[in-house]
Image (cartoon, rainbow, N blue to C red):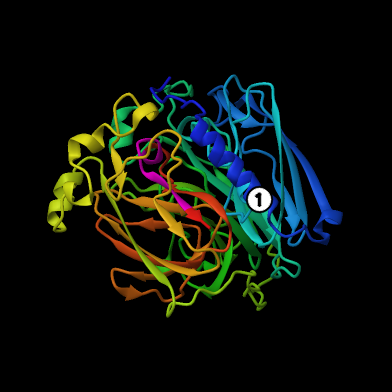
Amino acid sequence: MSDFQVPTLTRRALLAFAATVSAGAMLPPQSKAAARTREFRLRPGPGRAQITPEPHGDTAVWCYDGSLPGPEIRVRQGGRLRIVVENALDEETTVHWHGVRVPNAMDGVPYLTQAPIAPGKSFTYEFDAVDAGTFWYHPHQRSFEQVGRGLYGPLIVDEADPVRVDRDLIWVLSDWRLTKTAEMREDFGNRHDMMHNGRVGNTVTINGRVPDAFPVRKGERIRLRLINAANARIFSLDFGSHEPVVIAMDGQPVEPHAPEGGLVVLGPAMRVDIVLDMTGDTRSRVSVIDRFYKGLEYRLVDLSYEDEPLRETAPDWPVALPPNPLPEPDLATASRHEVTFNGGMMGAMVMQEMGGSMGDMGKDSSSMMGNMGGMMHSGGIWFINGIAAEGHVMDPMLTLARDKSHVIAMTNATAWHHPMHLHGHSFRVISRNGKPTRHREWQDTVLMSPRERIEIVFVADNPGDWMFHCHILEHQAAGMMGVFRVV
């Protein structure tokens, strides 16, 4: 077991929790979607899964309803979801609906938006599916271990008029740290992972299995929904002779385009929808290669062409998705906020290279290293504006005026990548290192390279206290998280 400690629910936390519930109660009355409610039950608990192929046996995992990944939750845009979560674990849990713009009380963050679900107890989540797109769900309680053991699943909101394809498929990507006998390595939350690039596993899966071949047909068009559910692994997928077209990022439509360098990059928690035309020859095989880690490239899966083509050439169907109802931010009137990430191995060196120091961020390094309190015995490792998050993280780092536009200028003053995720909102990525982005893409999780500076902008239209954190889950657990308060 790791040395992560669950904080107690303090009076301050109870008051903040009550405030978020009240904020949710003040939202406008629910729409006619209530008449189109889809109901699901999720039961997180221990299970076993055949992650690696025979002759290996199955692996002890934690999963929803005994399946890995968890059951696909699917609803039409404008519909409503009611999901009863029954906790069959021996520890507390929650469920967070990653990327879905839900009322604050439904966001699934323990001690911030709800009390955690105790073993043997249940909690009902209910919300409207306002945005179409590819989303996913996972715990936010001890997530570095609960997600790492297999608690995740896809959540798909279908457009009223989806793009035309032959198949609409989901690949939930993840990795595992296994022994030679396919047993789970029990080193969750170790200090080395938290100080470096997180828990990167030695076994990569698609939909909970080590893949071999993926059958396709010449002339076929596939919408492939890619979800990165790994704790820390970043993917950079090369589809060989195929030419993927990106049509959505983090569930939000984007101008259809070829990915930079032909590589589809997904940091942890990110999603990318691509349209993939099968242009290979019958009976051929094309390898999909992950090229993110230099010198450690590997074959993820082979696209294996069947004997009979579906058609001789790819179809010429439109691929652009309709926009979601996101409020457009106004840069001319937007408030500006500066956020700097620092810490981790080599953090002080990078800060000095970039002209600052850990002390410049508001605390001396010794006090910051002890600021994790009840979260870790070892003290904080990662910092946002010089502060490592405490266990319950109730004090907001930023207070944002509701229904106003806000620019968040973020600087990664560390030697490591960070996929930064904001709950309750999507934002436009408007610049990288001072250069405007080409597509001004909407995202909820943006991957920052070491020493990179990124600007995002959004309208803070969803009231409440919202988590803002690195989705390398070991970084989050070691301090890289905070709260944006929208009032």
Image vertical order of residue 297 relative to residue 202, above or below: below
Query: How many other residues sit within 10 Å of disc 1, few (<14), some (14-19) or many (≥20)?
Result: some
Image vertical order of residue 207 relative to residue 57, above or below: below
Q: Which quarter of the picture shows residue 365?
A: top left
Q: Under tag 1, what secondary structure?
A: helix
Looking at the rendered structure, the kind of residue marked 1 is Gly
Q: Which quarter of the picture shows residue 406?
A: bottom left
Q: Which quarter of the picture shows residue 326?
A: bottom right
Query: Residue 398: image x %, image y %?
Result: 41, 55
Residue extending farthest to the right is: 35
Query: Residue 275: image x %, image y %?
Result: 59, 66
**413 or 20, nearer to the observer:** 20
In this rendering, would 487 be left or right of 420?
right
Number of labels in the image equals 1
Q: Is residue 483 magenta?
A: yes
**415 or 37, nearer to the observer:** 37
**363 or 487, nearer to the observer:** 487
In this rendering, would 295 be left or right of 201?
left
* Residue at image location 44% in from the left, 46% down from the top: 471
Instruction: Read off the magenta span.
Output: 475-484
Image vertical order of residue 349 relative to residue 306, above or below: above
**Is any part of residue 189 visible from this angle?**
no
Q: Is residue 31 magenta?
A: no
Q: Which residue is mark 1?
A: 24
* Residue at image location 59% in from the left, 33% down from the top: 115
Query: Residue 220: image x %, image y %?
Result: 66, 65
Query: Residue 374: image x %, image y %?
Result: 39, 27
Image quadrant in which the N terminus is located: top left
**Is any part of residue 69 visible from this angle?**
yes
